[in-house]
Each structure stands twice: as C-alpha cells, then as structure tokens.
Image (cartoon, rainbow, N blue to C red):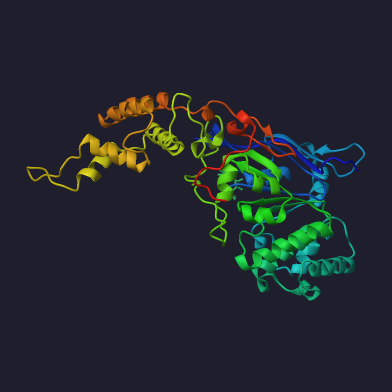
C-alpha cells in the first residue's frame, strides 16, 4: 500500500449530449461535471456540497462508472504494487472488483431493496454474487452486520415494508458494508429522512467510518450536515469545484462568495449567531449554456465592479441583474407601463398612461436600484439605456447596458488560489490580493 490517496479524481467530466430531430443530431451538451479534481485519503471523509443541479450525483455516478465519464481520470489505489489505476479504463472484470471496493449509498434506500426479499437476503445477495457459496456463513456475517448498524440479528427475516425510513437507511449501510469496501460514496444519505432521525444516522455513519477505516465521499446540499461528518469539504457550483479545504477552515474562513452564501443559509437556533445578509437568489443556471468566466458571477453578491465606476456593491449587482434581464428580453416595458398607469384616469376618462419617469422609477425599484446612482458616469450610461428602453428600442437598450456594465468576473475564468493547508478557492477576489474575503457589512456571524 502506498501513502498516497485512496482516490484521486482528476479533471473529471461528464457532458450529456443534447440532441435534436429524428436523427438525434447533437446540438450541444449539458456540462453537468466540467473538470473537477480532488483526492480522498485513506480513512478520510470528503464532503461534496452544492445546490441541487450542480452536478454532485453525476460526479458520484461517473466515479463508479454507473455513467461513463466524458473525460478525466479516476485513480484508485487498492494497494497493488503497481500503484493507483485509472477506473475509467477498467474492463468489466476490473470494474466488478472495483465495485466491491467502492460502494454507494443513496438518498432513498427503498430503491435498492427488493420488497419481496427479506432484508437479510438483500444484504447477503452481494456476498453470493461475489462468490461466497456458504449460506450459513453469509447469514452469520449479515446478522452481525445488522447489529453493527443498530438493528438486530432477528431482523434478517423481515421485509423492507416493516422498517421505517431511518431503519431502511441502516439496512442500506449494511448492504454497502457487507463486502468490506474501502470507499463509500454516500449520495444525500439523510436528506429524505425525518430531521429527528438524521442525527442518529449521521453519528452511525461516523462510527462505522471509523470502525471500518473507510474513506468516504459524502454528498449533500446541506452545509450543516457536511460540518458534522466531513474532514474536508469541496464546494461545487455548476459543474466545477469552487473551494476545497479542511471543514474547519472552510467553515470559519470561507474564501469563495458562493461558500459564504451557502454558509449564511445555515439556520441556527441562536438569533445572535445567525448569519444574514447574503441572498442566494435565482436558480443555478443551466449547464447547457453556463455563464462565461466565473460561473457564479450571475448570482454573486461580491461580483467585481468595472474600474470605471465606484458604486455601492448592491447597486452594482442590481445593474448587472437589470442588464442580464434586458439582454434576455425579459423586461416588458409596456406591461410595466400598464401596471403603473392603470391606477388613475386621464382628463377624457380613459386609463391614464404612465409617464416615462414613472415607468423608469418602477423598473429601478423592481431591481433594487435607486432613483439616481451615486456614480455620475454610471448614472449617465444607465439613463441613456433607459431612454432607449422607454422608446421601445429594446435591442439598443440591451446593447447600451451590455457595453456600459461589464464585470471582470465574466471575462476570464479564475484559477485556484492556495490559502495554505490544502485550502484553495477559485475567485478573482482572493486571487487579486490573496487574503480572506472581508465580511459584507451586514453579514453577522
Ligand atoms: N441524463 C441527463 N441528460 C442531460 N442532463 C442531465 C442528465 N442528468 C443530469 N443532467 C443535468 O446535469 C446537471 C447536474 O445534475 P445532478 O443530478 O448531478 O446534480 P445534483 O447536484 O446531484 O442535484 P440533485 O441533488 O438535485 O440531484 C443538472 O443540470 C441536470 O439537469
């Protein structure tokens, strides 16, 4: 056995083709996982965390080749003399052996339990598949394992429907452990469970991991769950890892604004401890057409300002939101005019038409923009774009906004910056001055 990591994922990619027409011509690709790299040491738990749709499950299934990766390497070191081998190049027999060493646990344990089989037979099944012919021996191993996961040996002969969600996840754990694997990939193992049983299952996972000396990739959208069980954490956004480091470090000194926003969403019972002030608004963009540059720039509260202006950060964010909506053709001036003007009547008794000023005020208000920006140059260019928009020339307005308001974050892709101790993040802010992000004034911790 070498001292190196058990698993090294290198530039892993999974791109799903997007096809069109009866000939299924490929017209694009969903870049669900777009070049992620991380290591998992022996006995270590790495958390992979991010919002729904960022590619966590695709990463997991690509690592064990339930789906074929499009690119990259998955190096697994099972202690052979020749060192780590690339799972993506395994033939069928090698893959079968690898799947004994690397087991998955899923969010819904019922999906992998046959309702017509006793849970004991379900757990014992893979022992038989992998060549253990002695039925009594299989039974003894499984009975012991059921006790290890907090069930009893007599549960062997019961059926899945007789168990609660938490108990089923215990059975899922027993199934994953029965072949004595080295690596467990747990995909949201507690998200479907009642809050009351989550802590029990998490502490069981922790205990089993230590007892069996397991390495684990623990996938979750929930930062608070990750904090409880993971030694290190990798934060994923739209197919890419944006920050990775020791859990303690990442939680106490987050370096990427996305991590910061995820942390601010953790509910805490103590209002004095509550972090607030960071709105993670909007959905994760589509991986078919991800934003250019830093993929988080369309939602980032710290998105970098153009050197030309000196605006309040919130106003800069709002300006970019307005720009993106106008460019997408999603600002319907006439609808706003109607909604603003519909409240009064004109001299002839007809519905009053809202003035351009009123419409502009309304749109500014919708986007959280003040009636006048503090920066004169920015205000002039915004006013210019509004003139065109209110004249009904959306294309010219979009062009004016797109050329006036550009963030460096969309122009190139940030590389990783090393913060020491294996803590790295990919953000221009930290790349610029290599120091921790200052907290926003209104973000309490
Ligand atoms: N077969 C597929 N074809 C095209 N796109 C897909 C396919 N499977 C997943 N995707 C897309 O890939 C992206 C990543 O999905 P994935 O399920 O891996 O995310 P996730 O972070 O695990 O989210 P969740 O927790 O909701 O499962 C999503 O945008 C999803 O729509």
**Res 361 → quadrant:** top left
In this view of the protein, which residue sits in the foreground, 191 or 318?
Answer: 318
Q: Give the residue at the far left of this rendering.
A: 348
Picture quarter with the N terminus? top right
Ligand 1 shows up in the quarter that is top right
* Relative to 61, 78 lies left or right: right
* Relative to 345, 102 lies left or right: right
In this view of the protein, which residue sits in the foreground, 66 or 394?
Answer: 394
In this view of the protein, which residue sits in the foreground, 262 or 143?
Answer: 262
User: Does residue 194 appear in this view?
Assistant: no
Q: Give the residue at the far bottom of this rendering.
A: 154
x and y percentages locating residue 326 in the rendered image: 37, 33
Tally the numbered discs.
Answer: 0
x and y percentages locating residue 79 in the rendered image: 89, 44
The residue located at (72%, 52%) in the rendering is 230
**Res 260 → quadrant:** top right
User: Does residue 104 appear in this view?
Assistant: yes
x and y percentages locating residue 224 in the rendered image: 63, 55
The residue located at (70%, 49%) in the rendering is 248
Q: Is residue 157 above or below residue 217?
A: below
x and y percentages locating residue 273 in the rendered image: 57, 56
The residue located at (75%, 64%) in the rendering is 122
In this view of the protein, which residue sits in the foreground, 445 or 264?
Answer: 445
């Amino acid at each position: 056995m070498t001292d190196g990591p058990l698993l090294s994922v290198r530039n892993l990619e999974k791109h799903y083709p997007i096809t069109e027409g009866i000939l299924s011509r490929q017209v694009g690709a969903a870049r669900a996982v777009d070049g992620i790299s991380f290591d998992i040491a022996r006995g270590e738990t790495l958390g992979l965390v991010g919002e729904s749709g960022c590619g966590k499950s695709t990463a997991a299934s690509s690592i064990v080749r339930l789906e074929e990766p499009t690119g990259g390497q998955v190096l697994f070191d099972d202690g052979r003399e020749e060192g780590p081998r690339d799972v993506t190049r395994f033939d069928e027999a090698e893959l079968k052996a690898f799947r004994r060493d690397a087991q998955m646990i899923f969010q819904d344990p019922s999906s992998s339990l046959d309702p017509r089989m006793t849970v004991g037979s379900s757990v014992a099944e893979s022992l038989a598949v992998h060549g253990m012919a002695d039925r009594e021996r299989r039974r003894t191993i499984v009975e012991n394992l059921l006790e290890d996961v907090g069930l009893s040996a007599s549960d062997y002969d019961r059926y899945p429907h007789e168990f609660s969600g938490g108990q089923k996840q215990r059975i899922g754990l027993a199934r994953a452990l029965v072949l004595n694997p080295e690596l467990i990939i747990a995909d949201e193992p507690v998200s479907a469970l009642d809050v009351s049983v989550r802590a029990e299952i998490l502490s069981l996972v922790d205990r089993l991991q230590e007892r069996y000396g397991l390495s684990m990739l623990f996938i979750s959208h929930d930062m608070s769950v990750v904090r409880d069980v993971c030694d290190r954490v990798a934060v994923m956004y739209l197919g890419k890892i944006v920050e990775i480091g020791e859990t303690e470090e990442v939680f106490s000194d987050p370096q990427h604004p996305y991590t910061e926003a995820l942390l601010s969403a953790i509910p805490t019972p103590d209002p004095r401890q509550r972090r607030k002030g960071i709105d993670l608004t909007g959905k994760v963009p589509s991986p078919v057409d991800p934003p250019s540059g830093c993929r988080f720039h369309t939602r980032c509260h710290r998105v970098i300002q153009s050197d030309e202006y000196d605006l309040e950060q919130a106003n800069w964010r709002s300006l970019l939101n307005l720009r993106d909506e106008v460019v997408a053709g999603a600002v319907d001036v006439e609808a706003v005019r109607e909604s603003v003007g519909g409240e009064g009547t004109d001299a002839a008794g007809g519905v009053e038409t809202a003035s351009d000023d009123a419409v502009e005020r309304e749109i500014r208000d919708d986007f959280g923009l003040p009636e006048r920006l503090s920066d004169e140059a920015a205000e002039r260019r915004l006013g210019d774009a509004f003139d065109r928009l209110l004249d009904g020339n959306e294309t010219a307005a979009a062009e004016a906004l797109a050329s006036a308001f550009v963030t460096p974050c969309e122009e190139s892709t940030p590389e990783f910056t090393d913060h020491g101790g294996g803590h790295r993040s990919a953000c221009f802010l930290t790349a610029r001055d290599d120091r921790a992000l200052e907290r926003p004034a209104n973000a309490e911790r």
